[in-house]
Each structure stands twice: as structure tokens, then as C-alpha cells.
């Protein structure tokens, strides 16, 4: 099971041909209290690096980018009523979407956990 | 507003806010009006809720306190001295400043000749008879240079403006503020009521108003920089007091429905449009002798074209500054401030709409990231004020 990270602080975990996507612990910490998450429609095609969702904290709205291209096959509906789940478990129950992966080689451009830990610290 | 060149100015209490003893230092600092300000300590929502339930201490030393006084040897006493200095400042504001009683504070706006707001400010008449002929004025951080210049220039030799923005201005806000202030500064602070001012011989000499920007009871305290650390530490040592950053200050004032200059007020917006008709007292309406009086009195009689309102989005998406307000697909206004209300646990906004829509219950659409979302015009404030009225 591979977990990779983007420079925009999204994480992606590959489960078969589906990628589970969310924002990193570091990103959630930086945002502070999440008060609203806007998720894409199921069936929407997304491109790596393009806007995919919006996360709003008490202070500001931030775009969330697709870490990998493909089709949205599931969204975490629990975030609609309970956006605080993003803070409670950003890399667990606070996942955003599942994407049916179009091109697995795109993962190669992303950072592994160790590289991301260094990146977030810098 | 207040864009700065060169390095940020440091607050006199900078070291105190950075000291992280017991994890109490500010987590985030940022530029506001050219000052390096503590934005966040524990987190916006916990800080906000603490202020609504206990007491928050805010460093607002970036603001512009000053004293405006008749020249030495003016020879006037009491009401006569006050009226003389008040008449000069009334040339710039629509409030009845001459009518202030000793120890009374008034909220008003500096106006341009078109009746637009150059700033919003507090003007106080000192309680002490020896200070008759003085006014204590506090203007906003981002506008203070031009405000001070305008006030001084307009006065000419008739009165002097003495800046006091080298001092610290601390705001103590929340239901515990009175108990804390009485314990730490003076028991006499209990006798003050909302919008009063008084001097206290403690921590050097303090000028304290019972006022604030949160909707809660509380005080704003002017203290000399060399005494400010001792005062702040004494207040913070009370178990009901925590330091609060500018982030929570903004969500608190938004819940309280209070204007933020540069957002709900600017040079094009009149006090009537801003729903601040109450700041223009009877005597000034009758005399019609303030800048932009023709426009302002006409708007008062005929209603303005647009009006400041509260807005409640009906779903969870916050509508922030700049969001377009529509009705039936037509633009009718714009959001000027918006965010999340911790007390209502819901998004709230303020903005301007065409006056026909400025009625509580009116349905509007907020265009958030291209999608119209239902919202309702609501009365302000969103959270009731809890001032200690006399």
C-alpha cells in the first residue's frame, strides 16, 4: 500500500485501482478548525494538479488539488455534517474523495512519506 | 489599506506575545496596517469562545490614540472649554461632541465632503475637570496617519493633536472583564458604564474606556509602554484571562455586527448606508453643518440606495468578502465580511444590498465559486451585545 504526498499537502493512498485522497496532518494543523468542505460530484473527471475540492477553516478558504488524474467514484459525505473530522483524522476518517486512477505513473511525481516530512518541515 | 514599505513595526509588547512559557505565546503573527501583530494564540475558535465566556486580552496598540486639546492658556473652564474644542472636531464628524457629558465616549465617523466615511473612531470627553478642553480620540491603525493629519490641519492653531500611539492600547473583553479589572487595576472600574472614560492612577497613569469591539462588556486601556508589560502580565495572571489574537477579534466583531473600516466602511459609504443613522444626534441633524450633510440628510429622509445588512447563508458554506449577492439572477449587492460564527456554529456575513432587499427575512442568493446558494437577510447583531449600560 503506497501513500504519497503533493507539494500542496494532499495525500493519496492507492487501494487497487482506486486512490483515496485527503489533506495531510500538516495541512490540517496549519488550517486550524475546518468549518466547511466542498466536495466534487461523483463521476466528475479530475486532472492531476487541478482544483478538486475546497476546504474552509475559520480563517480562510483553500483549494484542494487532485493529486492524480481520474474519475471521482466516491466522496466522504460525513464531512458535510461534520467538517471537524478533517481535524480529528486528516489522514484517516477525514479523507475527501476516492478517484479511479487513470494513469498510475503519475504517482512517480509525488513525494513519499519521508520526503514529504522533510518538505513540510522546511 | 495601510500597505507598508520597509520592515514591520513591532508592538511594545512584542517580546511578551512571543514568549512561549507554558505554550502561551502566539502561534502566528502577521502584518496588519504595517504592524507585526499576534494573529492567533490557542486557535481562532477556542480564543473566540474564551472571550465570550471568560475574558480575552487583546493588544490593539497598532491603533491610533491621541489627545486633541485647546492650546495652553486657553483660559476657558468646564463646559465652555469642552464646547470650544468639540466645535472644532465637529467640523469633521456628524456626532454631537459638544453635548458629551464629562466622562462620556461617542462612536462617530470622519467624513469627506461627499458624506463618505474616511474612518470610524471614538471621541471621549475626559471625566476630570482639569482636563476640560481636551478630547481623547482613538482612530484606526490603517488610517491613522491621514486621520491625524486631517484633524491637525483642520484645527490649525485653534487646537493641538498629540499622538499617543507610542503607548499601548490593551482591550480586556468578556463577561469576566469587570471582575478582573477591579481585582487588578481599581475597584472603581465597577462603577463605570458602557461608553464612559476615566483616568486611573495605577501602572503609571491609565486612560480607560468601558468599550470594545467584541459585543461583550469590557475595557480599552491606554497605558504607557514602560508600564504595559507589568499591566499585561498582571491581567494575564488572572485565571479568567487569556491572550487573544487579531483573528478571533475579527470573528467576535463580525458576530457583534460591528463595522470594520475598509470593509463595511470606506470613502464612498455614508453612515446612513452603513445603518449608522444613530450616530448623528438631533442637534447635528438640525444644524446640518457636517461634511456631506446634504447627501446624508437626503438619505436619512428618502432612504439610501444600498444598506448594510446581516446575511445568514442557509447551508454551511461561508460567504466571504467579495461574494456577489443576487436576486433572481441579478446582482443586488456584495459581501463585505464573512466567515464562521463559533457561537451560532454557522456561517455569517455582512454586506451591502439594494435597500429594497434590506429587510430581515428577505431571500437572496450568494454566488460562491460560481454557484448560487440560498441565504437570508437577518438583523444585526448575530449575537446579542452584553454591554453594561448605565
Image (cartoon, coloured by chain):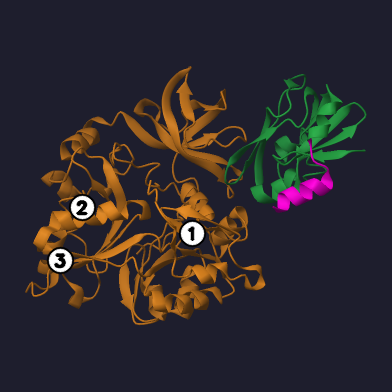
State the CA–CA distance, disc 3 to disc 1: 36 Å
Q: Quadrant of residue B217?
A: bottom left
Q: Nearer the viewer, residue A93 or A8?
A: A8
Q: Which residues are magenta?
A: A110-122
Which label is found at residue B82?
3
Secondary structure that dominates the magenta span: helix
In the displayed structure image, the side of residue B310 where residue B43 appears, left or right: right
In the displayed structure image, the side of residue B68 where residue A121 appears, left or right: right
Q: Residue at x 77, y 45 (%)?
A: A90
Q: Nearer the viewer, residue B143 or B305?
A: B143
Q: Is residue B125 above or below residue A52?
A: below
Residue B315 image point, x, y percent: 61, 32
Query: What residue sits right under mark 1 in the picture?
Result: B37
State the CA–CA distance, disc 1 to disc 2: 26 Å
Q: Residue at x 21, y 50 (%)?
A: B93
Find numbered disc 3 in the image and state the secondary structure of the residue it sits on: helix
Q: Is residue B88 above or below residue A41?
A: below
Q: Is residue A111 magenta?
A: yes
Q: Which chain is mark 3 on? A: B
Q: Mark 2 or mark 3: which comes first in sequence?
A: 3
Amino acid at each position: 500500500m503506497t501513500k504519497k504526498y503533493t507539494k500542496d499537502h494532499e495525500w493519496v493512498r492507492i487501494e487497487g485501482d482506486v486512490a483515496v485522497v485527503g489533506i495531510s496532518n500538516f495541512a490540517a494543523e496549519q488550517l486550524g478548525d475546518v468549518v466547511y468542505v466542498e466536495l466534487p460530484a461523483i463521476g466528475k473527471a479530475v486532472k492531476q494538479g487541478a482544483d478538486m475540492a475546497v476546504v474552509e477553516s475559520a480563517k480562510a478558504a483553500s483549494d484542494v488539488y487532485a493529486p492524480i488524474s481520474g474519475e471521482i467514484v466516491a466522496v466522504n459525505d460525513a464531512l458535510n455534517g461534520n467538517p471537524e473530522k478533517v481535524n480529528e483524522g486528516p489522514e484517516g476518517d477525514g479523507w475527501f474523495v476516492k478517484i479511479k486512477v487513470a494513469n498510475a505513473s503519475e504517482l512517480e511525481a509525488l513525494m513519499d512519506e519521508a520526503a514529504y516530512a522533510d518538505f513540510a518541515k522546511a | 489599506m495601510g500597505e507598508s514599505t520597509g520592515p514591520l513595526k513591532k508592538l511594545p509588547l512584542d517580546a511578551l506575545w512571543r514568549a512561549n512559557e507554558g505554550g502561551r505565546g502566539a502561534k502566528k503573527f502577521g502584518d496588519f496596517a504595517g504592524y507585526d501583530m499576534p494573529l492567533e494564540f490557542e486557535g481562532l475558535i477556542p480564543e473566540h469562545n474564551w472571550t465570550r465566556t471568560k475574558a480575552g486580552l487583546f493588544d490593539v496598540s497598532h491603533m491610533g490614540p491621541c489627545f486633541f486639546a485647546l492650546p495652553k492658556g486657553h483660559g476657558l473652564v468646564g463646559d465652555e472649554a469642552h464646547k470650544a474644542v468639540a466645535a472644532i472636531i465637529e467640523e469633521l464628524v456628524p456626532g454631537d461632541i459638544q453635548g458629551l457629558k464629562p466622562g462620556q465616549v461617542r462612536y462617530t465617523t470622519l467624513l469627506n465632503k461627499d458624506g463618505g466615511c474616511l474612518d470610524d473612531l471614538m471621541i471621549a470627553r475626559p471625566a476630570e475637570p482639569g482636563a476640560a478642553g481636551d478630547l481623547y480620540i482613538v482612530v484606526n491603525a490603517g488610517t491613522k496617519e491621514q486621520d491625524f493629519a486631517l484633524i491637525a490641519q483642520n484645527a490649525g492653531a485653534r487646537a493641538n493633536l498629540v499622538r499617543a500611539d507610542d503607548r499601548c492600547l490593551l482591550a480586556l473583553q468578556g463577561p469576566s472583564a469587570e471582575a478582573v479589572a477591579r481585582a487588578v487595576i481599581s475597584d472603581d472600574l465597577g462603577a463605570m458604564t458602557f461608553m464612559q472614560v476615566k483616568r486611573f492612577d495605577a501602572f503609571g497613569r491609565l486612560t480607560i474606556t468601558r468599550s470594545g469591539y467584541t459585543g461583550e462588556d469590557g475595557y480599552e486601556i491606554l497605558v504607557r509602554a514602560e508600564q504595559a508589560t507589568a499591566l499585561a502580565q498582571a491581567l494575564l495572571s488572572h485565571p479568567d484571562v487569556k491572550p487573544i489574537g487579531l483573528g478571533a477579534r475579527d470573528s467576535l466583531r463580525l458576530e457583534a455586527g460591528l463595522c470594520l473600516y475598509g470593509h463595511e466602511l470606506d470613502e464612498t459609504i455614508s453612515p446612513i448606508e452603513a445603518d449608522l443613522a444613530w450616530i448623528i444626534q438631533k442637534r447635528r441633524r438640525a444644524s446640518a453643518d457636517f461634511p456631506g450633510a446634504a447627501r446624508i440628510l437626503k438619505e436619512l429622509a428618502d432612504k439610501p440606495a444600498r444598506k448594510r445588512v446581516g446575511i445568514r447563508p442557509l447551508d454551511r458554506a461561508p460567504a466571504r468578502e467579495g461574494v456577489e449577492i443576487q436576486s433572481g439572477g441579478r446582482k443586488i449587492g456584495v459581501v463585505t465580511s464573512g466567515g464562521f460564527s463559533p457561537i451560532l456554529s454557522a456561517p455569517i456575513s455582512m454586506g451591502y444590498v439594494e435597500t429594497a432587499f434590506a429587510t430581515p427575512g428577505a431571500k437572496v442568493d450568494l454566488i460562491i465559486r460560481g454557484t448560487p446558494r440560498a441565504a437570508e437577510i437577518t438583523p444585526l447583531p448575530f449575537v446579542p451585545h452584553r454591554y453594561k449600560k448605565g
